Image: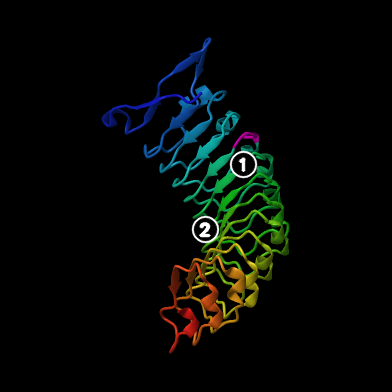
Amino acid sequence: MVCCLEMTSKRKLIGRLVPCRCFRGEEEIVSVLDYSHCGLQQVPKEVFNFERTLEELYLDANQIEELPKQLFNCQALRKLSIPDNDLSSLPTSIASLVNLRELDISKNGIQDFPENIKCCKCLTIIEASVNPVSKLPDGFTQLLNLTQLYLNDAFLEFLPANFGRLVKLRILELRENHLKTLPKSMHKLTQLERLDLGNNEFSELPEVLEQIQNLKELWMDNNSLQVLPGSIGKLKQLVYLDVSKNRIETVDLDISGCEGLEDLLLSSNMLQQLPDSIGLLKRLTTLKVDDNQLTILPNAIG
């Protein structure tokens, strides 16, 4: 049961949300608490009064440095939102949150995930962008219900070899990292629809991409690609492709396989010509080729 919320005077509680309280017998039921933007330095103690019923807890944009052990007694918790705080670590006690489905720890100072996060088997969404995470533990690949993973602006240099175990992933964002390759096991991500690898260190398009057949959106901008290979044509579901701000000199592309492409971004490369096959992109609505070395466009573009 989701409780109602009302705002008290800002002068009294700095915008803290106070729940209207419901009762089941003699038990007080509160399932949602929101303490966002309250200037807190620690998790309020009254949260622990509802450890049996609390399902959603929002602590966004505070100054919390540590999560107390008692918080992880809230085993009914389904969503924990603590972005934009001062956390430096994620406690191993998180393994107790066996019903957790959504976790937002973005914009903190967290350097790694504990191995036993694998116990949070119900997790479907993890937002951990803007943290100095350098690697993912093997236990992370046991979160088999993950559908969305956001790890933009971290320090990742590689993904675990068995990353392909996360077969339910639909959205994977890894922008602004130090990735140079992708594990071969990623060919198992048959449900992946959106992949953002922009602003990494790829010098060539990873071969495993051509096997992710349901991919619809692909960002590879701000890398060091020199060729857009013909293998991209195997992505028959592709609708959006951004390879701008690379060093691409050649589009070695049988585009006929990407006939559903609607947006093709090739800006800021070293292109001298475009292939005639670009005329096969009947659904194309956006074509960006500015800041290249083109002197002529193919007749087929008409």
- Vertical placement of residue 1 versus 287, above or below: above
Bounds of the magenta segment: 96-100
Q: Quadrant of residue 62?
A: top left
Residue 66, image x, y percentages: 51, 40
Residue type of the residue flagged with mark 2: Asn
Specify the label residue 152 is tagged with.
2
Residue that label 1 marks: 123
Q: Position of residue 233 (x, y in %)?
A: 62, 72
In the displayed structure, 58 sits above or below 238; it is: above
- Asked which secondary structure carries label 1, the reply is loop
Regarding residue 270, the answer to whether it shows in the image is no
Would residue 17 be found to the left or right of residue 230 on screen? Answer: left
Q: Position of residue 71 (x, y in %)?
A: 55, 32
In 3D space, how far apart are the residues under numbered discs 2 and 1 (Cα atoms)?
19 Å
The picture quadrant where one finds residue 60 is top left
The outermost residue toward the bottom is 295
Q: Amino acid at mark 1?
A: Leu
